[in-house]
Image: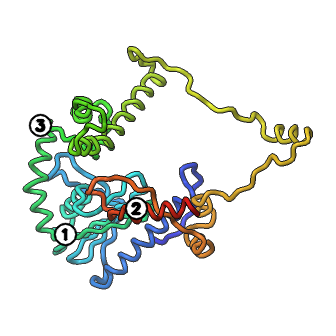
Amino acid sequence: LRIRSKRPTSEYDSDEMEECTDAYVDFIMEQVELARKSCTDPIILIEQRLDFSCYVPDGFGTGDCVIISDDRLHIVDFKYGMGVLVDAEDNPQMKLYALGALEIYDSLYDIKEISMTIFQPRRENVSTWTVPVEELKAWAEEELKPKAAKAYQGEGEYMPGPWCTFCRASSRCRARADENLKLAQMEFKMPPLLTDSEIEEVLTILPDLTKWANEITVYATDAAVNHGKEWHGFKVVEGRSVRKYKDENAVAEKAVISGYKDIYRKSLIPMTEMQKLMGKTKFEEILGNLIYKPPGKPTLVPNSDKRPAMNVADAKNEFNEIMEG
């Protein structure tokens, strides 16, 4: 940690990525210093293989960082993605990693509690959850182990849900299709005649149904375009496109020669590009007091969403003020 190295040249590397990884390193160093307050020589492991196959057959993962300080074990998982906000509380993946770490070090240290942290910089999310070791082991024996054994044998029931996003078979999974097609099996009436409970049922299903429908379209299109698959009743056509200049310099030259001068538009680069250009710290120092975040458009979400409920009357007033201004 903290050992400087030459920055690699790669199309996958960027200033944003370097800024995120630097923030991650800073966080890890902070946790190491905290560990040293209770332990003179904490163990720090990077990219540690964690085997939890005693609970989940063939199960293992990689701990991005594991810090052991006498009676406390801390696992940190760096997540660069921003599509899904990940919470550490009762997180099954993190609990599996914790079990894997215990398998290696529980006999060497008197570990009493485990902290699990999700570090997700592109969502400005640092989530930590701490659990006693005995509670974690009880979950592993009573809930995890029996379910894992069933899954390994191909038994048990399929449970479609948000986790299907990360499954390679999600587009062709029959259980997921059956779940999403429940909406199509409803007896539809004109919207004004739907009862409140029917509307609530549709609202609950719609996000997953829409996502699943889009994934099916992507899967079928890829099969047709890239693998020659022919779908009965469908064909591949050229999509709509917009006109483009062949050569912008040549266009500008001809326009000027023809007497047209106001052919360029000057505007600020988008805020995300500006922050990448300056770096997050400099961006805040230079432009922080010139940035504001307007109220978001009111959105209907399930009660499980962690955002606080809006006062609808206040929301109407705020949007009216913006429109009038």
Q: Residues within 10 Å of mark 3 (few under 14, many from 20)?
A: few
Q: Residue 313 location in percent, x, y?
A: 38, 63
Marks 3 and 2 sit apart, C-alpha to C-alpha, by: 34 Å
Q: Residues within 10 Å of mark 1 (few under 14, many from 20)?
A: some
In this rendering, is residue 38 above or below 63? Answer: below
**Secondary structure of residue under mark 3:** loop
Task: Pick whichever, 265 or 214, lies toward us.
Answer: 265
Q: Does any portion of residue 216 appear in the rendered image?
A: yes
- Residue under label 2, please give it: 120
In this rendering, is residue 224 above or below 198? Answer: above
The part of the image, by quadrant, that contains residue 85 is bottom left
Mark closest to the chain's N terminus, 3 or 2: 2
Q: Residue 35 location in percent, x, y?
A: 31, 79
- Residue under label 3, please give it: 155
The type of residue carrying mark 2 is: Gln
The type of residue carrying mark 3 is: Glu
**Secondary structure of residue under mark 2:** strand
- Residue under label 1, please give it: 131
Task: Pick whichever, 105 or 173, lies toward us.
Answer: 173
Q: Residue 266 location in percent, x, y?
A: 74, 55
